[in-house]
């Protein structure tokens, strides 16, 4: 069985608008998740002092993670040095784990700032880590409409979580 191919079958991103709509009705998703204690339901992988790592529920590829400060702000100027340092540390740790667990061959790492920067949730800063594989762009348009498999996300969360539990110091 080709594990990589299986993962590629879980590429999806079709419900983005629904997500944005839902966010407007229920308040800030990042604040809500960071305050919740149910990390499993929220697919949170790790909590630091200043920020936390979680799954994107509407991912572009399998293993699409996000790192978000606890602070509710859209302005990178308002993020403390300690928080910026922690986010970069978590980004490195996350990419190392995604290489080991999902054989990621490359990454897109960054933030969409402001509505015209493409932010889905523009009020609360979050950095995306999107693992990439050679040739995956060939699959994306084809699988763009593939139905979301929530179990797939949970499987990946279960796979990654023990590695994130080993993160220490920053
Ligand atoms: Zn918030």
Image (cartoon, helix red, strand yellow):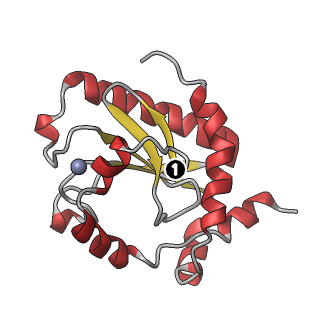
State the image coordinates of residue 109 (x, y, percent, origin top left).
Answer: 40, 48
- Give the total of numbered labels: 1
Left or right, residue 130 beside residue 121: right
* Residue 117 in the image, given as x and y percentages of width and height: 21, 63
Placement of the C terminus among the 4 image quadrants: top left
Neighbours of disc 1 within 10 Å: few (<14), some (14-19), many (20+): many
- Which residue is found at the position 33% from the left and 78% from the top? 17
The residue at the point 53 percent across, 39 percent down is 95
Query: SS class of the residue under badge 1?
Result: loop
Q: Report x, y in % for residue 135.
A: 62, 66
Residue 97 vertical placement versus 18 (above, below): above
| Between 28 and 4, the one nearer to me in the picture | 28
- Image quadrant assignment for residue 79: top left
Residue that sits furthest to the top in the current view: 169
Q: Give the image quarter of residue 50.
A: top left
Task: Give the side of residue 19 with respect to residue 13, left or right.
Answer: left
Q: Residue at x 60, y 37 (%)?
A: 97
Identify residue for label 1. Answer: 43
- On the rendered image, what quadrant is the N terminus found in? bottom right
């Amino acid at each position: 069985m080709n594990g990589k191919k299986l993962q590629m079958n879980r590429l999806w991103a079709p419900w983005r608008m629904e997500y944005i709509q839902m966010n407007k009705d229920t308040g800030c998703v990042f604040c809500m998740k960071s305050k919740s204690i149910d990390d499993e339901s929220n697919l949170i992988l790790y909590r630091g002092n200043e920020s936390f790592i979680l799954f994107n529920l509407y991912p572009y590829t399998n293993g699409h993670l996000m790192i978000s400060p606890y602070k509710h702000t859209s302005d990178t100027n308002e993020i403390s040095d300690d928080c910026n340092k922690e986010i970069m540390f978590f980004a490195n740790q996350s990419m190392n784990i995604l290489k080991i667990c999902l054989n990621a061959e490359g990454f897109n790492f960054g933030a969409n700032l402001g509505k015209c920067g493409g932010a889905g949730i523009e009020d609360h800063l979050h950095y995306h880590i999107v693992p990439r594989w050679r040739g995956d762009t060939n699959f994306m348009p084809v699988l763009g409409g593939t139905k979301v498999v929530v179990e797939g996300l949970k499987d990946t969360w279960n796979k990654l979580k023990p590695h994130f539990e080993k993160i220490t110091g920053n």
